Image (cartoon, helix red, strand yellow):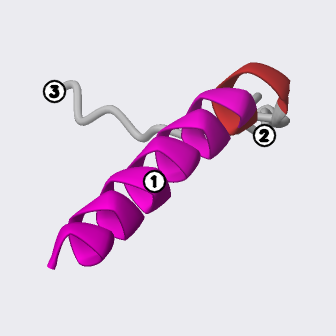
Amino acid sequence: MWRLIKLLFFLAVIGAIGLVGFAYFGDLTPQQQDVTEPVTLDVD
C-alpha cells in the first residue's frame, strides 16, 4: 500500500513539474489576425 502512495505522489510531482515546464517554455502565444466586417446602420 505504501508503494502505491509513493508512486502516486511521484507521478503527481512529475506531472506538476511537466506542467510548469510547459507553461514556461511552451509556445502559448495566441494566433492573431485582423478581422474586418461591414456594418450596416439603420439610421432613419
Residue on which the image places disc 1:
10
**Considering the numbered disc 3 on the image, is that residue within a helix, a strand or a loop?**
loop
Give the magenta range: 1-21
**Considering the numbered disc 2 on the image, is that residue within a helix, a strand or a loop?**
loop
The x, y position of residue 39, in whole percent, is 47, 38
The x, y position of residue 24, in whole percent, is 74, 20
Q: Is residue 32 above or below residue 18?
A: above
Q: Quadrant of the image for the N terminus?
A: bottom left
Decide which of tag 3 and tag 2 comes sooner along the chain.
2
Q: CA distance from mark 1 to mark 3?
A: 69 Å
Q: Amino acid at mark 3?
A: Asp
Residue 32 in view here: yes
Residue at (84, 35) in percent of width and height? 27
Disc 1, disc 2: CB below 8 Å? no
Decide which of tag 1 and tag 3 comes sooner along the chain.
1
Residue on which the image places disc 3:
44
Is residue 36 shown left or right of residue 15? right
Residue furthest top as drawn: 24
Q: Quadrant of residue 21?
A: top right
Q: CA distance from mark 3 to mark 2?
A: 40 Å
Q: Amino acid at mark 2?
A: Gln
Type of secondary structure dominating the magenta stretch: helix
Residue on which the image places disc 2:
31
Residue at (84, 26) in percent of width and height? 25
Which mark, by number, is residue 24?
Answer: none
Q: Is residue 5 above or below residue 44?
A: below
Q: Nearer the viewer, mark 1 or mark 3?
A: 1
Q: CA distance from mark 1 to mark 2?
A: 35 Å
